[in-house]
């Protein structure tokens, strides 16, 4: 049997052993997995450096692209949209004004016919100017080819029938302006 004194000694031996182990673990805690902790810190630094490098390179790439490439392309496209937008508006106005003139002639409204005719001539002058500006302002091979390539079909009256001729965009728009002017010049009779 174990007496009380032995239990007391066993208990204090166990506690002192626990205390010794705790002190050793506390003393060595900085060196436990020390190499792994250093490796994890190095990996974290590499990841952060890589991420920072990626952000810097992406920013530099964006700035170079934005300032040098896109600004020229965007400004060129905006100029084209601006000039062709005005041209398109004039062309549509001519079509609608010719329709208005024909309806006024059909109803016998001579004053409206004269007003539409005057407006058509004014818009036609603006259409010619914008078409010429677009033609003279072409600054790329692609736009030049679009204006000069003879691949558009023109339906031209020839005697009592219509014939199909191939023409360029330049010729097509000039033909359109001529026909609108001829339609505007028609009298209500």
Image (cartoon, rainbow, N blue to C red):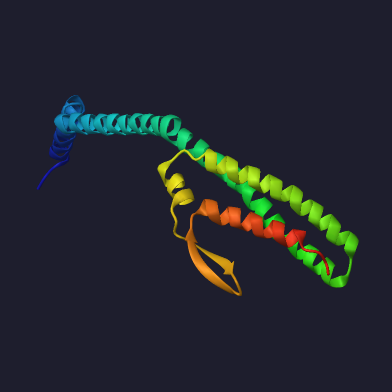
Residue 60 picture quarter? top left
Q: Position of residue 113 (x, y in %)?
A: 84, 61
Question: Looking at the image, which is closer to me, 168 or 50?
Answer: 168
The residue that appears at 75% across and 54% down in the rendered structure is 120
For the view shown, which residue lies furthest in the top direction? 27
The residue that appears at 56% across and 39% down in the rendered structure is 79
Say whether residue 78 is visible: no
For the view shown, which residue lies furthest in the bottom direction? 160
Q: Is residue 36 left or right of residue 175?
A: left
Q: Is residue 165 left or right of residue 161?
A: left
Question: Looking at the image, which is closer to me, 26 or 107?
Answer: 107
Question: Looking at the image, which is closer to me, 83 or 168?
Answer: 168
Say whether residue 41 is visible: yes
Q: Is residue 26 above or below residue 157?
A: above
The residue that appears at 19% across and 29% down in the rendered structure is 38
The residue that appears at 20% across and 26% down in the rendered structure is 30
Q: Position of residue 168 (x, y in %)?
A: 49, 54
Q: Is residue 115 left or right of residue 16?
A: right
Q: Is residue 7 above or below residue 150?
A: above
Question: Looking at the image, which is closer to me, 103 or 23?
Answer: 103
Q: Is residue 23 left or right of residue 164?
A: left
For the view shown, which residue lies furthest in the left direction? 1
Q: Quadrant of the C terminus?
A: bottom right
Q: Is residue 151 above or below residue 148?
A: below
Residue 2 picture quarter? top left
Q: Position of residue 173 (x, y in %)?
A: 58, 54
Count of numbered badges drawn on the protein: 0
Q: Position of residue 132 (x, y in %)?
A: 59, 43
């Amino acid at each position: 049997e174990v007496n009380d004194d032995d239990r007391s000694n066993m208990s204090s031996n166990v506690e002192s052993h626990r205390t010794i182990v705790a002190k050793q673990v506390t003393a060595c805690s900085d060196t436990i997995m020390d190499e792994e902790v250093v490796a994890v810190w190095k990996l974290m630094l590499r990841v952060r450096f890589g991420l920072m490098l990626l952000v810097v390179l992406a920013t530099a790439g964006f700035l170079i692209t934005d300032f040098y490439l896109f600004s020229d392309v965007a400004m060129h496209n905006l100029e084209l949209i601006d000039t062709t937008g005005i041209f398109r508006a004039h062309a549509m106005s001519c079509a609608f004004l010719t329709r208005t003139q024909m309806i006024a002639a059909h109803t016998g409204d001579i004053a409206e016919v004269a007003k539409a005719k005057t407006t058509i001539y004014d818009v036609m002058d603006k259409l010619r100017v914008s078409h010429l500006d677009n033609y003279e302002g072409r600054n790329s091979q692609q736009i030049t080819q679009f204006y000069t390539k003879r691949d558009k079909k023109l339906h031209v009256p020839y005697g009592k029938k219509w014939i199909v001729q191939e023409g360029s965009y330049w010729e097509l728009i000039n033909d359109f302006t001529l026909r609108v002017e001829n339609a505007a010049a028609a009298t209500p009779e």
